[in-house]
Amino acid sequence: MSATAYSIKTPAAAPLRAPLPLPVSAIETHAALPQLAHDDQARMNVGAAFNTFLAQRMLPAVERAARAEVEPARQARLGQPAADRHEYRRDLEQNLTWRLWSRLRRSNMEMLQQAGRLAVLPQLPALVETCREINAGHDRLELDPTFQPPGYLSRLHSHLMPGGYVAELGDDDIAAGAAYDVVTHAVLGGRSGPASDRAGRATLAWLREHRPGWTPRRILDLGCGIGTNTCVLARAFPDAEIIAVDAGAALLRYAAARAASLGVTNIRFIQGDIETPPVGDERFDLVMTLMVLHETSRPGMQRIFASCREHLAKGGLTFHLEQPPYRDKPLLEQCLRDWDGRYNNEAFWSAMHDTDLAAQLRAVGFPAQHVFETTANAPPLGATTATQEDYGRGGAWYVVVGEKPLLKEVSV
């Protein structure tokens, strides 16, 4: 396989009439999905519309203010431009337009997360029973009652999600998964698709382009969440055995019930730490993480990469999809992309985007000629090529790949 040159182009400025988000009623329905009453739908739709307003109207104003006010003010005060994004951000934080956009973006995320709780908690007993009944009909869910999630997951409420990914509200709880399903659709305005699975569709499109005709027999998905992206691969490769690992029991109960109710039967959901996945000495043709690496520390990331190599079959592929690194971006764009790392409870976001992931793969033993950087994408819904990039929530994904070569491919 030849490496594709790494390059992500920033979309053009927003058109006068930005596309509206898709309503939450467009979400993919399944038996485990919470029932959204009129007020629940209204809250979600207002939050989605407000995110669209922030991206299509306010974000261009922030960019104009940075160039017309922030940069000239620094030049006049100090006689030199900012040396790095940290200096640039400190200047931005004094600007009223930036502060207003940032405060509103944070508040809207908080409101959407609370809207998810308001929708799920009143019907939680019924949802728990529904998922319990669905999961009783198959053996594709493996939970470990002795498992202790990594401390950073239990202490950190990622994305301002109350309780974070591993919260447990009671026996057989599924609240985190159910809320994640509906809130993600609203945060992304439905443009990741009815199932919010654009990352999975981008992965599949990349595989079909770069490995045409390849049919992996075994797939390991690390950090699967509620399995929306996993299901894309499961449907595309129905004869493949897929193991999906996550730390959150509530996420996995919901994921297993969701997949089963959609007729996806070739995924086994297992609770565990993705740094040391509980799969024994099993080997896989494809080992992947999709928007997961920013949730862990740099040492944790290296342990994940080492596990990927350990569990990869000869001739296999490890595939990691993320938001792009900062290294080739203007300082303003770095600050915009770094917003989640400072204001959205993403403690490891900034460090991950500063890390040379290709070098990390080489450091754990992948041959240099079998490590490369590329991009992946899948069509959004309701957006155009002229739509303003909503940094951190768009689909301009960076991918780092490591191949475990066959013996005959290893140069001596």
Image (tube, rainbow, N blue to C red):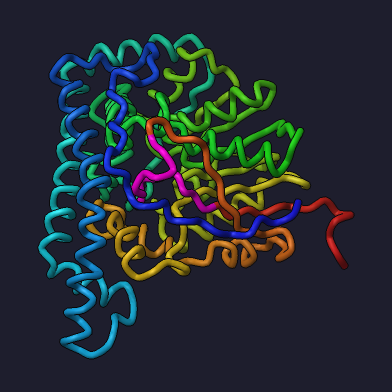
Residue 236 seen by the camera: yes
For residue 378: magenta? Answer: no
Q: Nearer the viewer, residue 48 or 358?
A: 48
Question: In the shown orientation, is residue 406 left or right of residue 190?
Answer: right
Residue 349 occupies quadrant: bottom left
Q: Residue 324's spot in the image, x, y percent?
A: 46, 57
Q: Nearer the viewer, residue 27 or 170?
A: 27
Residue visible at 68% across and 36% down in the picture: 208
Residue 3 occupies quadrant: bottom right
Region of the chain picked out in magenta, as a range: 383-398
Q: Residue 405's spot in the image, x, y percent?
A: 78, 53
Q: Residue 369's spot in the image, x, y percent?
A: 74, 63
Residue 77 occupies quadrant: bottom left
Residue visible at 58% across and 59% down in the picture: 6
Question: In the shown orientation, is residue 249 left or right of residue 328?
Answer: left
Say which quadrant the C terminus sits in: bottom right
Predominant secondary structure, magenta span: loop
Question: In the shown orientation, is residue 19 left or right of residue 76?
Answer: right
Residue 176 seen by the camera: no
Question: In the shown orientation, is residue 43 left or right of residue 405?
Answer: left
Q: Is residue 154 above or below residue 35?
A: below
Q: Is residue 358 above or below residue 180?
A: below
Q: Is residue 407 above or below residue 170?
A: below
For residue 392: magenta? Answer: yes
Residue visible at 26% across and 77% down in the picture: 87
Q: Residue furthest front?
A: 16
Residue visible at 52% across and 31% down in the picture: 230
All told, the count of numbered labels is: 0
Q: Residue 195's spot in the image, x, y percent?
A: 42, 25
